[in-house]
Image (spheres, grey):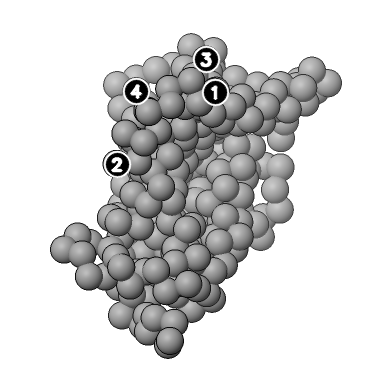
Amino acid sequence: MWIRSTMAYRASFAMTTFGNFAATFFDFVAIMLMFSRVDALGGWSLPEVAFLYGLSAASFGLADLVIGSMDRLGRRLRDGTLDTLLVRPVPVLAQVAADRFALRRLGRLTQGLLVLGWALPRVDVDWSPLKVLLVPVMVLSGFAIFCAVFVAGAAFQFVAQDASEVQNAFTYGGTTLLQYPPAVFAKELVRGVTFVLPLAFVNWVPASYVLGRPYPLRLPGWVAWTSPLVAAGCCALAGLAWRAGLRSYRSTGS
């Protein structure tokens, strides 16, 4: 329904999609401006940082497109309109994810894929079948991890009552963090996004294997292939949190 509504105004859709693309593209422009003054950032070259950027942006862009409307849940909790979703014979999670589905978010996904495509032939990598395979695995695993963060943030809103900005700090903030090499951040922060909220498995850890870089926190080499397992664990925990939050819902009390 929301796609049909969007496509009823094709010129508006084209302009908003391009605006979404341009707004996110300026993030990468800022990185390029940094490299106009330095040769490396935390020891990483521009193509290597672009590789990180593309992986993070593509994974998050796909998650934002599919399930990015979860941050609207807080408003429904506050005004009681979540009740209308509970009486429909469709999973509430699917309904919330589809609420005001914004096809214009394709601009963010497209921009991330373009940067990734620009970086792949420019990174100094001796490509092997395993490294080639790991690239799509990273994108899909990162997509699942970001989806889990979206769902966990929505579950938190059952307790906090409309705390979308807290959720955005870990979703939009998380993808911005991952666009830069781990070497530029404090070790405490790197530990946090590795062992507490495992965003590092979106790109930092597996990309270190592909690029031949030292692993964050000197992790063993085999962890580069654990991103799908981490993603599955995150989705399972997010699902449990969502079920607990939904069961605790008591409407507005009116």
Q: The residue under label 4 is which amino acid type?
A: Val
Looking at the picture, how far across and down is residue 134, in whole percent?
Answer: 35, 31
Disc on the earlier residue, 2 or 3: 2
Q: Give the CA distance from mark 2 to mark 4.
A: 38 Å
Q: The residue under label 1 is which amino acid type?
A: Met
Q: Nearer the viewer, mark 3 or mark 4?
A: 3
Disc on the earlier residue, 2 or 1: 2
- Image vertical order of residue 233 relative to residue 136, above or below: below
Q: Tell which residue pokes out farthest to the right in this image.
A: 37
Identify the image quadrant of the N terminus: top left
Callout 3: SS: helix
- Labelled pair 3, 1 in contact (Cβ < 8 Å): no
- Image vertical order of residue 70 relative to residue 156, above or below: above
Q: Residue at x 65, y 57 (%)?
A: 189
Callout 1: SS: helix
Instruction: Give the crowd class for mark 2: few <14, some 14-19, many >=20 residues within 10 Å.
Output: few
Instruction: Give the crowd class for mark 3: few <14, some 14-19, many >=20 residues within 10 Å.
Output: some
Mark 3 — residue?
Answer: 118
Q: Give the CA distance from mark 3 to mark 1.
A: 24 Å
Q: Give the CA distance from mark 1 to mark 4.
A: 35 Å
Mark 4 — residue?
Answer: 132
Name the mark on residue 15.
1
Mark 2 — residue?
Answer: 1
Instruction: Give the crowd class for mark 1: few <14, some 14-19, many >=20 residues within 10 Å.
Output: few
Task: Return the residue nearer the eye: 92 or 14.
Answer: 14
Q: The residue under label 3 is which amino acid type?
A: Trp
- Labelled pair 2, 3 in contact (Cβ < 8 Å): no
Q: Residue at x 19, y 60 (%)?
A: 90
Disc on the earlier residue, 3 or 1: 1
Task: Return the residue nearer the eye: 133 or 247.
Answer: 247
Looking at the picture, how far across and down is residue 188, in whole percent?
Answer: 66, 60
Looking at the picture, how far across and down is residue 71, in whole percent?
Answer: 49, 57
